[in-house]
Image: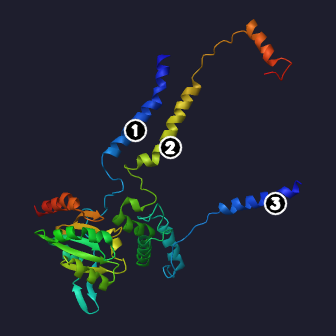
Amino acid sequence: MRRWNVLPLLILALFFVVASLPFRAHAIEPGEALEDAGLEARARDIGRQLRCLVCQNQSIDDSDAPLARDLRRLVRKRLVAGDTDRDAIAYIHARYGDFVLLRPPVDERTWLLWFGPAAALFVTLLFLLWRLRRPRAISPVEALSVEDAARADVLLGDGGDEP
Amino acid sequence: MGSRRLLFLVPLAVFAIVAAIAAYYLSSGRDPRLLPSALIDKPAPVFAAADLAVGETIVAKGFSSAFFKDRITVLNFFASWCAPCLVEHPQITALSKVRGVTLVGINYKNKPDEAAAWLARHGNPYARIGVDPTGDLAPEFGLYGVPETFLIGPRSRIRLKHVGPITISVLKDKFLPAIEALKQ
């Protein structure tokens, strides 16, 4: 009986493993990729760092939108022209602004974004430490009165199943 | 005990601050989707756009970035398949009639015969029209889509960028004052 139950469990487990595999859809179309595998790998890497501006938070590598395709072509054009990865990203950044970068730059306008969570955590930890280390006045325990003891006896008494 | 009890007001105070900030930004009328263009006050990108031509017949002459040099230019990206372009067409036409302003167009990812038919039907207000059949030029201008319009001042400086159709209020409140400021 026990052995009979293992199979559906295994199938379920397999389902979750498959469902959680890092499956990535790429929107690169045939003919778009560069022949030079090294350059193409760099272009793919850059594409994953740039936002498709007309999509819902997809990278240009992931998106089928015409604008994303045009930007992928531009990245490849820049790389073929001899740009470094940093140059190619800077080229597009200069034209589309910060929004095109999926990883926002660290500057005074984004300090809150980058360091805010860590600062909030730090402040919370400080507060917790302060609260926990403070000596707490321990209130003396009063002795059980006769009435309370009698009541406890009724409640905990040997009967057990009365309400 | 009194200060202890005040401690319970801290979350309420934090909430009040967050709510006040949210209320400020919600009521300020600022559209968070509108992003400042990275190109404002930068020189226009260097390019050359070919004539809009159907077969051998030139519908409108093309232009290059050198065209912007010594004039005030309104540069409009448009296409015949783009419905908002038709919506803004009267305003674009009005811009072409503003004294001291030259209106030029980039015909974006459009079949030339369809573009020519559209211009014949709705009127051609453009002094020059260059073509961008493949969408190679558009990213140079940080284009999201059509229509998109740039005001380019002397020395090829980009002064204004508008994404989407130019409505009457955009024309009155954004473009005309900026053009007046450039003339001075």
Residue at mark 2 to residue at mark 1: CA–CA distance: 22 Å
Q: Determine which of the numbered discs, if any, sits on residue A118 in the image.
A: 2
Question: Is label 2 in a helix, a strand or a loop?
Answer: helix
Q: Is residue B43 visible?
A: no
**Label 1 to label 3: alpha-carbon separation:** 53 Å
Callout 1 amino acid:
Ala
Chain bearing mark 3:
A
User: Do the residues at pointers 2 and 1 share their chain?
Assistant: no
Sequence-first disc among 3 and 2: 3
- Regarding mark 3 in the picture, which secondary structure is present there? helix
Q: Are marks 3 and 2 on the same chain?
A: yes
The answer to which quarter of the image holds residue B169 is bottom left
Q: Label for residue B19?
A: 1
Relative to B133, A162 lies left or right? right
Location of the C terminus of chain B by quadrant is bottom left
Residue furthest top as drawn: A146
Is disc 1 placed on a helix, strand or loop?
helix
Please name the residue shown 52% across and 39% down the image: A121
Name the amino acid, label 2. Answer: Ala
Label 1: few (<14), some (14–19) or many (≥20) C-alpha neighbours in 10 Å: few
Give residue A64's position: percent from left, percent from top.
48, 71
Kindly report which numbered mark, 2 or 1, lies closer to the viewer in this rendering.
1
Checking the image for residue A7, the label placed there is: 3
State which quadrant residue A94 falls in. Answer: bottom left
Q: Residue at x 35, y 71 (%)?
A: B139
Chain of the residue on which disc 2 is drawn: A
x then y, percent, for residue B182? 14, 62
Q: Amino acid at mark 3?
A: Leu
